[in-house]
Image (cartoon, rainbow, N blue to C red):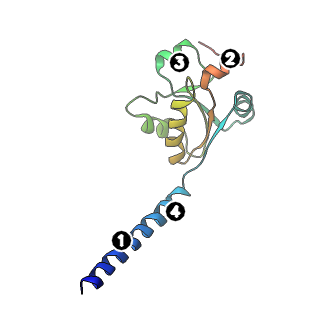
Amino acid sequence: MRRLLRFLMMLSAVLGLGACQQKTNAQATDVKEIRTVGVDEFEKTIASQQDVVLLDVRTSEEYAQGHLDGALLIDFKGKNFQTECTKQIPSGKTVAVYCRSGFRSNSAGKILAENGYTVINLKGGITAWQEAGKPVVK
């Protein structure tokens, strides 16, 4: 009797884990990918696609020191980052996102992708942009 009980408990656990895995895989297909690209490809993307929202996820102080022309500022460290993004960026848009070095923008990109946006992340952030001699505005 104990063997049967143990067997049933193990079987339930295995089936339960399988069900969780299936749900996770189904959810993963709904999340869009983040594409991290270099400066030249990022520049081409924002110049050639009218449907792209250029998003700076740095602080307002960093933004004031220089940003890409036309960039929308939503501070990733702010309390309401996700809410502000969904409020200010129409669904279905491609978001070209950057920060100082690429770390915050990658994290922000994950949140954006989970909310249905197509995300292009600038590798190396605005630092790489400036090192490549690309323009910024203040």
Marks 3 and 2, how far apart in space?
17 Å
Amino acid at pointer 2: Glu
The residue under label 3 is 63
**51 w.r.t. 25: above or below:** above
- Residue, x 29% and y 85% (percent of image)? 4
Marks 3 and 1, how far apart in space?
51 Å
**2 w.r.t. 60: above or below:** below
Q: In which quarter of the image is residue 43?
A: top right
Horizontal and vertical percent for residue 95?
60, 37
- Secondary structure at numbered mark 2: helix
- Residue, x 70% and y 36% (percent of image)? 50
Disc 3 versus disc 2: nearer the observer: 2
CB contact under 8 Å: marks 2 and 1: no
Left or right: 120 in relation to 41: left
Marks 4 and 1, how far apart in space?
20 Å
The residue under label 4 is 26
**65 w.r.t. 8: above or below:** above
State the residue lying farthest toward the front.
3
CB contact under 8 Å: marks 2 and 4: no
- Residue, x 40% and y 73% (percent of image)? 15
Residue 2 appears in view? yes
Disc 2 versus disc 1: nearer the observer: 1
Marks 4 and 3, how far apart in space?
38 Å
The residue under label 2 is 131
State the residue lying farthest toward the bottom.
1
- Secondary structure at numbered mark 3: helix
Amino acid at pointer 4: Ala
- Residue, x 24% and y 87% (percent of image)? 1
Q: Earlier in the sequence, mark 3 or mark 2?
A: 3
The residue under label 1 is 13
Q: In which quarter of the image is residue 137?
A: top right
